[in-house]
Image (spheres, rainbow, N blue to C red):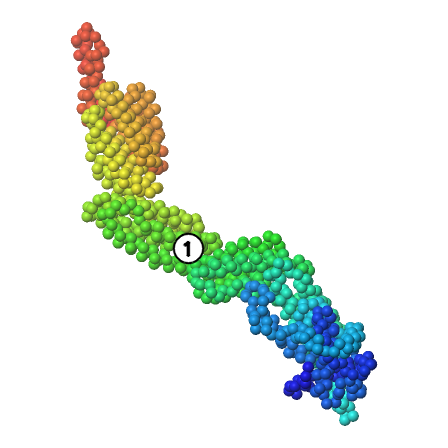
Amino acid sequence: MGEVRGPPQLRSFCDGEEEENEVNAERHGAGNPKGKPLRGTLERICGVSPLKTLEKLGKGLRISGRNVWSSNSPNYTSGDSNTLPADREKRKGLRRGSEGIMTLLRFTGRRKEERRESLPCGDLTTECDPVGSRRPSFLKIVSLGKLTRESMSDKTSQEDDEEIMEEEQVVKTREPLSVLEILQLVNHRDLLLADTQIQELERECELFPSTPFGGIPLSSSSLDESLSSNATLDSSRRKAKDVELLYEALQKEMWDVVRESLRQPSAGPNLGLVVLVIQQEEYADAAWALREETKTEHASSNIHPSQRPRRLKIKWRLAVAEAADWSLPQQVDTQAGQLALYLEHLKSRMVDDLDAARRNAVSIYPEEFAAFQVYVESYHRAVAKRLRTITSEPLQITDVYALLDWFYNIYNRDVLGTIGTNMPINYAALEPILPQQTVDRLEQDCIQIVRDKVTTELIQILDEEERRWAQTLYIEEYQSQLARSVIQRLKVDLDRSTSVSQFLGARVARCSLIGLADFLYSFQRKVEIFHETQAEFGDRGDGYVSRTIALVNCCPPLRTFVERCRQCDPQGSEESARRATSSLDRIINQSVRVLTDRLFEHIRPFFDKLMKRKWLSNTESFEAIEGGIKQHFRKFKRMDPPPYQTLVGDVHRRVLVEYVRAIMRGQIICTSSKMRKRMAFRLQDEAKELKGLFKDLESSASWLDSIISHIADIILLEDTPSIQMEVAVLVKEFPDIRKKHVSTLLNVRGMMRQAERQEILNIVKDFERSSAHLGQNQALFSDIPITSEIHCIRLGFLRLAMSVSNWFSEHRPRRKRQTSVRSAMSQPAGSMEDTNKVHKEE
């Protein structure tokens, strides 16, 4: 080491080191028989490994420093102990200072910062950048001494080594570690020993007075002592600064250990040293606080002020928080609409880090540290910080749903829930990761977007669909994309909002249903205009039927969606659901009526040919009715359920109404038992045919199938009690039947006796009172009015002719002619009386 050159400030900074080096030279002068300064010490001590003994390294530096300062001092020569001031004997045993500690600390800190900056975010590696690797470290400089050790003489080396070993034993027992040696302990992560030495150095600094003489004026005789005191004050200030720099380096190394413990398979012994250092510093803070309470004002004025309390436990919490914030990924290149992917990465990193902390680090901390809770709270705050940054800017609707879902469900269930399965967590100490005001704003954005979709996009879809109706009228198209387009627009928001929270789903459902009810009313009006236009122009081709079926097929999915919205918000959406359902019912009923009328336009003329004498022997009319129904339902089956069940049920009912109406017209009057049997058997056969037909068409109105069979039984039966029972069953199954209907059936049967008729008609009176509460699904005879009454005289003559023929067949021809004539004359009179009673009854 050559001559030290530099500004005057650096030379004055080194005066204290020079004084201590001179003291050490005087102290060890007796051990040097030759009385010569030790030369070549730095070169030889550099060849020794610094890890064997740090005291040896520091001693070698001080011995080499003695030559440095002697070449720049005019009043001191190497080996001359007589030139030392007289007061230097008082300073023996003090801690040795370090020259250039500021430069070394800055150099070491700069190397660590470069190493940290070279690490990727979220990953700890020990690789250094190429530039940093080319910078010579302190240990590398020391190792360079091995190159010069071989050039020295063997005799001088041997003698000097023996002298240095003797001096080292003295230093170990009498002198504490220097600042450089403490720094080496910190760099090698011998943290507990380094903290102990720093505390000793800190206590030495507290013993130096802050002012040399308490402000007393100095005389000329004490000028030398004043200058010496000023030098001592500068040395104490420098040591106090060294203490703070050493504490800074110690804490940086400690927090690096805390950070690295999240990425290593095991925390290792270094984290345990960090815990011991924190406990030792907490104890020192407590002792300092006790001294501060008990010391007097006079004592406090003569002691150098300390930086206590250092509160390393609180700083450890901050270090864990910084490590959590450093580990979690930042939202740097996340594109719009890709927030869900970033949140998934955030969740995975947080779960992995806390699991690693639980396995590696938490067991090392004492129970009073509550380490796992500290780690959880640190990561929780880091996540909340990122979410606040995300919500400070406008978001797309998909990102809003992803963020709300993460807030309501994923974070609590998949993050905290997964972490809390192995270690207990105090959830009460965790604040919400998003403020409630921010959550309300995000939910309101969802509602506004849904409202805009309903009011603008759905109307555009309906207008486009209406234009297609006119363009594709002559094309058989049985399905429409209208319902699918509408539901797709609204279902996305309803599904996402419902998965986020029930409250948000209810609000979105209410907004969707209000707009959907308005849309369906507009849809209903356009369908009515479509049917009115087609009826006006008389254009009812195949394209019209297919378009009608396509419009009806839009209703089932829309009804299902309306019901789902109502279930999401049962209280607030009842009125809107009722309006929407009413519009759909009107569309279905109108379309069913149009298709049913189209069918009966073809088959109604054949009903007029039923119940005539030709009908008893010819089945063409009934077969024409059955064939027309099958032909039309080849297209009607393209209709989706449940509107199809409504259509086939309506056709089923109207067919039977027309059939019973043909019976009630009374075009056939049974005048004999044989004729009643023929008519009854024919009715039963056609009843079976109609039942099988509508069963194939999947009609749900099976309650209509028994009406023709009951009418056939009433016509077929002979005894009055059996007829009464059959009428009772008919009235029970069809409560809307009236007395006139039963009376007409008795006329068709040919029953003209008043007593028998009255017994049968009394059965109907008992059921007429209960028909006021009849539902529309059970109404049949209410649509069958009684047409023209059968003329009573005609009926009477028919009855008379039948009676006379029966009498002649029963009596023998040997009876007197006079008795026969009297009987024949009396019978018509009774028949006329019964006929008049029937007319009066009707």
Give the residue drawn at x 27%, y 28%: 686
Image location (x, y in percent) of residue 296? 76, 77
- Residue 383 seen anywhere in this rendered image of the structure: yes
- Percent across and percent down for residue 832 are 20, 21
Q: What residue appears at the point 71 percent right and 86 percent down from the top-left corner?
A: 71
Answer yes or no: is residue 388 visible.
no
214 up-or-down from 581: above or below: below
Question: How many labels were placed on the picture?
Answer: 1
Quadrant containing the C terminus is top left
Q: Is residue 297 left or right of residue 456?
A: right
Element on which disc 1 rests: helix
For the N terminus, the image quarter is bottom right
217 vs 328, left or right, is: right
At a point 77% along the width and 92% down the height, the residue shown is: 219
Residue 620: x %, y % from top left: 21, 29
| Residue on which disc 1 sits | 493
Tag 1: residue type? Asp
> Is residue 653 found left or right of 137 in the rendered image?
left
**Residue placed furthest toward the top:** 814
Quarter where residue 746 is shown = top left
**The one of 103 and 547 positioned closer to us in this rendering:** 103
